[in-house]
Image: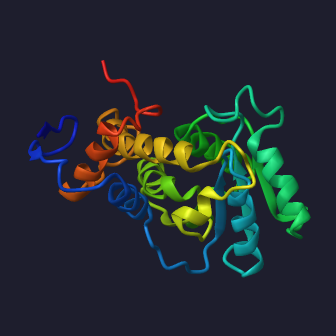
Amino acid sequence: MERIGNVADSYLISTDTMTVEQAIRTVWDFHHMNHELISSDAILVLGSHDTRVAERAAELYHQGFGKWLILSGGLGRLTEGVWETPEADLFRKIALEKGVPDENILVENQSTNSGENFRLTEKLLQEKNLFASLQSFIVVQKPYMERRAYATFKKHWPEKACRVTSPQMSFDEYCESPHPEINRETVIHLMVGDLQRLWVYAEKDFQIPVAVPSHIMQAYYTLVDAKYTQHLVHIS
């Protein structure tokens, strides 16, 4: 039995009845918001080490889901020291290759984390006198960061409408990435870390609180017990 800390409710969970494979699928599915997308004022793309996020955003632009494609990201924890080009600049190149007009692309290339994505994007939009007029967004992120992206959005821009999406693929398809650093083991470590951040970052007031059901916590502890801990936040 494991006692869960750093969540809204304190209770006991047994990790004996869930297999590691079941836990992986459970956490993967929970990270997805499953939003039905509607036409919005802008498509906001949060930078990452996965260029398929930019491809998904360009696809949405061509489907008419937003007039503006806003790309946000400098060099973050997964790209600093690995990429020389800021995430947003590389994503802009991909968007242009996919046929998105340059005049409809806005780039914020200094942010290093999710909070800065929103703070620095807001600064950019204010400078261009667009922030007040853009009231609805589709946020594009990696599949295992959908829920955290939504929670961060609502912390920074609570008055604006948000729907979240990501590259449309299963866990197995996602792990078959063209990027060698995106593989099954790494993805599991990352999605466990992002699950933990849902309550840790809410406690730090970085995002709004997120309800985490007991079976999700069971899956979390099953994966922690299986040593998928490389991307957990160390809590003092």
Q: Quadrant of the C terminus?
A: top left
Residue 61, by quadrant, is: bottom right
Residue at the image position 81 percent from the left and 59 percent from the top:
105
Horizontal and vertical percent position of residue 143: 53, 59
Q: How is the image coloured?
A: rainbow
Residue 29, by quadrant, is: bottom left
Query: Is 236 in front, or is 68?
Result: 236
| Left or right for 171, reference 106 | left
Horizontal and vertical percent position of residue 202: 33, 41
Q: Is residue 166 visible?
A: no
Query: Is 51 in front, or is 117?
Result: 51
Query: Is 119 in front, or is 222?
Result: 222
Residue 211, by quadrant, is: bottom left
User: Above or below — where is 123 with respect to 18?
Assistant: above
Horizontal and vertical percent position of residue 156: 47, 47
Q: Residue furthest top?
A: 236
Horizontal and vertical percent position of residue 81: 74, 25
Count of labels in the image: 0
Residue at the image position 89 percent from the left and 70 percent from the top:
99
Residue at the image position 64 percent from the left and 40 percent from the top:
120
| Left or right for 54, reference 198 | right
Q: Is residue 12 visible?
A: yes
Q: Quadrant of the N terminus?
A: top left
Query: Is 138 in front, or is 48?
Result: 48
